[in-house]
Amino acid sequence: MRYLLYLKKSFRRQPKRHLTLYIVLTCAFILPLLISICRDSSAYGEQQQILDMTKGAAFHIENASAEDAELFEGIDGMSVPRYEDGVIYLQFLSDEDWKDAGNVDHCGSIIMERIEQSGKTYLLPTAYSFDYAIESDMGDEQTLLLLLNIFIIVLSSFIVGSAYKSHLRRFSSDMGVLRSCGAENRQINTIFLTEFVIVFALSSVSALLLSAGVMKLLFVSFLEVRADGFAWLLFRMDPVNTALHIVIFFIVLLAVITSTLVKFGKGSMANAVRNDIQSSEITKKPKELRIKTSPERSLLALWLQRTNKTHRSCLYVAIPIMTVFLFLFAYLSLDADWVSRLPEYELTISKNGVLSGFTQDEIASIERLAQVREIDCRRPSGEVPYPQSEEVSGIDIRLTSSELHEETETLLKQLFPGAEYEIVDNQARAERGQEMSTGVYFMLMFIFAAMLGFMLIIVYMKLCDYIADSRKTIKSLSTIGASNGTIKGSYIRQSFVSAMIAAVLPTVGSITLFLLATNTVTQKPSVSPTLICAYFAVSVVTACAFILPVCRSIQPILERK
Amino acid sequence: MNTVEIRNLSKVFAQGEYKVKAVNNVTFDIARGELVSITGQSGSGKTTLLNLIGGIEIATEGSVYIDGIDICLADEKELARLRRQKIGYVFQDFNLIPILTVEENIIMPLLLDSKKVDRDDFNQITRFLGLENRLAHLPSQLSGGQKQRVAIARALINHPSIILADEPTGNLDRAMADEIMQLLLDLNKEGITILLVTHEERYADMCPRKLVISDGHISECR
């Protein structure tokens, strides 16, 4: 393994190149990890919410008193009834019995029989299946997130693979020299694959620490939800899921890099030693040169026709990344806006699970409260549980001041203590939503920083390499009388063309995706100033990402020639 | 009448504390239609002198007049124009643009000057240099001798006042080098002014006028 000495030296002599790869891989990792954490947290939150609701019990009998508990004693295979806050809980003694749906039906019918025999028809039993209460199935949203994540991983792998290809091209001359010294392709591949494994290990650990740290902080500060009336969201990072993401990333990347190395190994050794990248790229008969009115425009036409491969590959990187980001931004902004929108009615009280609606006295007692400005009665209009459709099933309450929502909620709970009454604090919900939307924006900023960092580094690396590879052409042009302004202008114009494409296409693509995604939801998209500013800022940054590296790297070449 | 007039030309390269005087107070003229060779050992300052005349390097002191214009006073844009219109350069390593075909490489100086290609003139040059069957080829598909012919054609296309040839035979085998040297002699017979830098005495001796450079100082040999 003495040839690995080359690797050691390479790390020491070209630390910038390896650092770039490390940053690219770390950034590429962050988005899938964030999605994975969100997915795990949502699933964990959902599971905890169900557990909190079911209390691990198969049957809940609501509207009960402590004395009613003895009615359900002695059911075969079930625990002693447990009474708590107007609810009797009954558990299966064994999980296996609970898993059997027939068993649940059988016990349910025994409970119903006992209720009917006792004449206590006000008791409201609810049965929970084992799958629902304990083993929450992966919902559609979870599956969708998993598929999205796999897609992002595969896409990121190809983008990283393209950056890795640029990195390997820098070493193609060394590879040629090593081959000419007698190194086998297997040995050369081992060097670069070992390098990849080291960089991958470092960057995956960094990305894990970074995403877990940032998400934990965001959850603690803004995103954690453990409140009634909300889908719970609790920070969770499932080790198996995370490991799965890393393994998929590693395998796809390894395949991409190995195929690149194999292709390099099959290439001409003479070309590799000469490192004449531009001429070795042109294999087909070139198209006829388009001569324009000015030298700068003619050169631009030439670059677009013959040397635009790098710009195209940069566009393949920038367009999907920025499209995904802008789509995420627009979609999550809409979601945050919807969640945090201030309600028309601060509180809502509804009467569930009984065969009669609110009485006139009950309605009057709400109206009499000093904090209440007005109420709006909702009628179910023939919904199944209500035989008399004119009865009031829910009351929306508007307060004299929205700040009184907590106080009024407490008062309502005292006035209507029964289990059939459900009080929803819409104001608290909106305030929580506003707090969460701040967290969502912070998360988007973090995602944007990672994605932008990823894109900028790859585009910067590729375009600087492109200019460095054009050194020979620049030198030749200069000696035959092209002014620095003409040369620089032509390369900047070439970048400008790519910059415009990179700025416009993600905007169009993300708007299309956004409209498609929101087509199925009732919440209609709206154009906010924040959204316009975000789109504008992303377009400007993307455009600059194409122009600045060329401006910066061409200047020293023109000065030195 | 002189095409090139060089007056007290010096070039100092500073490398940290060390200063190297590559060209030291050089003065000479080249008349229109002359073929002049400059010889000297490696590191004697031949290429630096040529680069100063061609406006590729900036002189530390002195003047270079081409057709009466002092290129040492010209700005970057003016220098580029002079290189396009007054000077034709032929390099040892050809300096062809790898992404352009032979034809495109040859017409590139015209393109940079926003001039139209005179097809008769183009055909005459390519026929003279034996390139008429190689016009659609890329530089990577040519031999060394062919590449140098393309470089000469490119230098001729704008009908410059002088051709500066820097070791044009340096990368070629004997037969090819002889062929290229014969081409330069033939071009000179057509009235083209040529300044040839070479370390091969054989080729320097073929030139009617021979200069020798040593430690940056120039001396007339013939």
Image (tube, coloured by chain):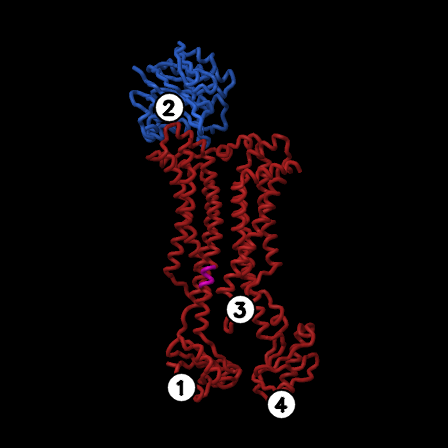
Check residue A441 for magenta coloring. Answer: yes
Report which colour depicts chain B. blue
Question: Residue under circle 1?
Answer: A368
Mark 4 and mark 2, same subunit?
A: no
Q: Is residue B175 left or right of residue B108?
A: right
Mark 3 and mark 1, same subunit?
A: yes
**Residue nearest the viewer, comparing A198 with A63:** A198
Question: Residue under circle 4?
Answer: A118
Question: Residue under circle 2?
Answer: B54
- Residue A42 position within the rendered picture, expressed as x and y whole percent measured from the top left: 54, 65
The chain painted red is A
Q: Are marks 1 and 4 in contact (CB under 8 Å)?
A: no
Q: Which mark is residue A232?
A: 3
The amino acid sitting under disc 2 is Gly
Q: Nearer the viewer, mark 4 or mark 3?
A: 3
**Residue nearest the viewer, comparing A370 with B217:** B217
Q: Is residue A264 visible?
A: yes
Residue segment shown in magenta: A438-442
**Residue nearest the viewer, comparing A309 with A206:** A206
**Local secondary structure at mark 4:** helix
**How many residues crowd around disc 2 within 10 Å: few (fewer than 14), some, or many (20 or more)?**
many
Q: Is residue B28 above or below residue A246?
A: above
